[in-house]
Image (spheres, rainbow, N blue to C red):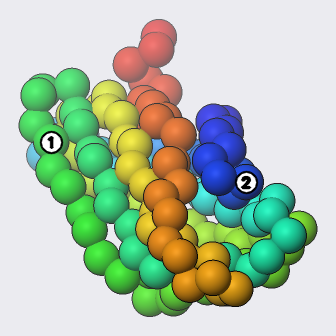
């Protein structure tokens, strides 16, 4: 589990290898990740967009950018959390992800960047 606080917003990430959906003989390794976002500020924030950087051990990488998360642009009130699950596919059993969210201070309408901590994506069988 990885955690990082930026601009008063805490992002916690936990990744899981999804063995039942992966096809190692076809170089397809599926990972899910659970994200919890806590607003430690005294004002509400809105998650407007996100950008992910995804890397695997073969040297491949790609970026994902878009509005909100899983089709939502959640407003997170002070001291409240927003959690969601998503996933990614790699062509190798080891990789990493990192990124950031663009948040909006709902009182001032000012946008700011909240970093997502870098986290590993590792299929357990490579650790043996």
Q: In the displayed structure, does residue 108 sit left or right of residue 116? A: right
Near-viewer residue (77 or 18) = 77
Residue 100 versus residue 111 in the image, above or below:
above
Residue lying at 47% horizontally and 11% vertically, measured from the top left: 128
Q: Quadrant of the N terminus?
A: top right
Residue 64 versus residue 25 in the image, above or below:
below
SS of the residue under disc 2: loop
Quarter of image, res 64: bottom left
- Residue 61 is labelled as 1
Mark found first going from the N terminus, 2 or 1: 2
User: In the rendering, at what x and y percent does residue 6 appear?
Assistant: 62, 47
Graded by Cα atoms within 10 Å as few (under 14), some (14 to 19) or many (20 or more), the crowding at tag 2 reads some
Residue 111 versus residue 52 in the image, above or below:
below
Residue 109 versus residue 8 in the image, above or below:
below
SS of the residue under disc 1: strand
Real-space Cα distance between discs 2 and 1? 30 Å
Residue lying at 68% horizontally and 69% vertically, measured from the top left: 83
User: In the rendering, at what x and y percent does residue 25 appear?
Assistant: 16, 40
Graded by Cα atoms within 10 Å as few (under 14), some (14 to 19) or many (20 or more), the crowding at tag 1 reads some
Q: In the displayed structure, does residue 120 sit left or right of residue 51? A: right
User: In the rendering, at what x and y percent does residue 39 appear?
Assistant: 77, 65
Disc 2 target residue: 8
């Amino acid at each position: 589990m990885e955690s990082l606080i930026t601009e008063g917003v805490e992002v916690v990430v936990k990744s899981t290898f999804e063995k039942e959906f992966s096809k190692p003989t076809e170089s397809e390794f599926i990972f899910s990740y659970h994200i919890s976002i806590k607003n430690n500020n005294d004002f509400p924030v809105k998650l407007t967009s996100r950008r992910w950087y995804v890397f695997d051990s073969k040297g491949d990488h790609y970026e994902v950018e878009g509005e909100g998360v899983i089709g939502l642009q959640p407003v997170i009130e002070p001291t409240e959390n927003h959690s969601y699950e998503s996933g990614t596919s790699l062509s190798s059993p080891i990789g990493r992800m990192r990124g950031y969210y663009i948040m909006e201070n709902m009182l001032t309408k000012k946008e700011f960047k909240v970093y997502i901590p870098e986290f590993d994506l590792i299929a357990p069988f490579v650790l043996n």
